[in-house]
Amino acid sequence: MPFIYLAERSIVMYKCNNLQVINGPLLMMGIVRSLIHTLLLQGKKGDDIETGCRQAGYQGSRSTLNTMIAQERKQCLQPSSVIKPKEVLSALWKMSHPNRPSGEIEKEWEASWPPIQKLLTLLVTFRQMFVKKDDTLFDSFLQIETWAGFPRIQRFLRRLNHDAVAIRHAVLLPWSNGVAEGHVHRLKVQKAIMYGRGSFDLLRKRVFHRSIMS
């Protein structure tokens, strides 16, 4: 059986070098994680945490530090204390249904953001605007932007205000662009079915044939 001869001095040097290479970073990571945990409990943000870790001797990348911060933040924060705005807005939209409202405001939401009940009332007003065909409710709904704490709601309202005329027409007038959207969707479906197997002339004939038959 073949064997490799290694001198005792070589083995000792290998062990010493590897202990320095392995134990050094592992020890530093433990110190950094403990420091991150402490700074998170103090309410520090990412930049402040990075400054503290650099001063403690951390020399790694910011991306690695962000990963450790995210992991430690999950351990520091209780799952019940984390409120996701997307889930809150989705629940409020279901509660504001004109005919079939469902769900209720949780106590944690109301405790962290008291105006949430007012937001629900205005969402109901916005949806009732289309049911009752009353565009005067639109002006009161736009006032939400001055106090709403949700960036998603603020962006939504800015877009509504930009298209205010079109929204008023959608509320008051009986016409809809649903027919045009339906034809566009039908064309896209036919185009997807024929992709790679037909030309524009064939697509044109299929569209005209459908129009004549209907």
Image: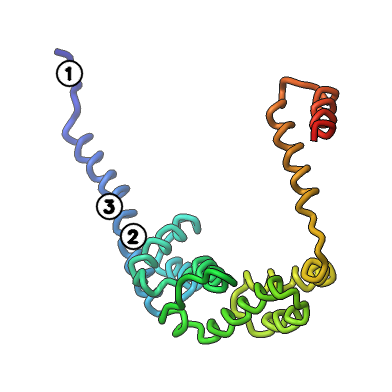
Instruction: Judge by depth and name the residue closer to the eye, 6 or 180.
Output: 180
Instruction: Give the label, 3 or 1, closer to the camera.
Output: 3
Q: Amino acid at mark 2?
A: Met
The front one of 36 and 116 is 116
Which circle marks residue 23 in the picture?
3
- Seen at 80% across and 48% down, the residue is 180
> Is any atom of residue 162 visible in this view?
no
Report the residue at 77% width, 70% height from top.
171
Give whichever of discs 3 and 1 has the lower sequence position: 1
Instruction: Say above or below: 7 vs 18.
Output: above
Mark 3 and mark 1: Cα distance apart in space: 30 Å
Q: Is residue 92 above or below residue 116?
A: above
Image side of residue 15 versus residue 181, left or right: left
Looking at the image, can residue 172 be seen? yes
- Residue 3: which disc? 1
Label 2 sits on residue = 28
Locate residue 77, reporting x and y percent.
36, 71
- Label 2 to label 3, Cα distance in Å? 8 Å
Location of the N terminus (image quadrant): top left
Residue 165, located in which quarter of the rendered image? bottom right
Q: Earlier in the sequence, mark 2 or mark 3?
A: 3
Residue positioned 84% across, 32% down in the render: 212
The amino acid type found where label 3 is placed reads Asn
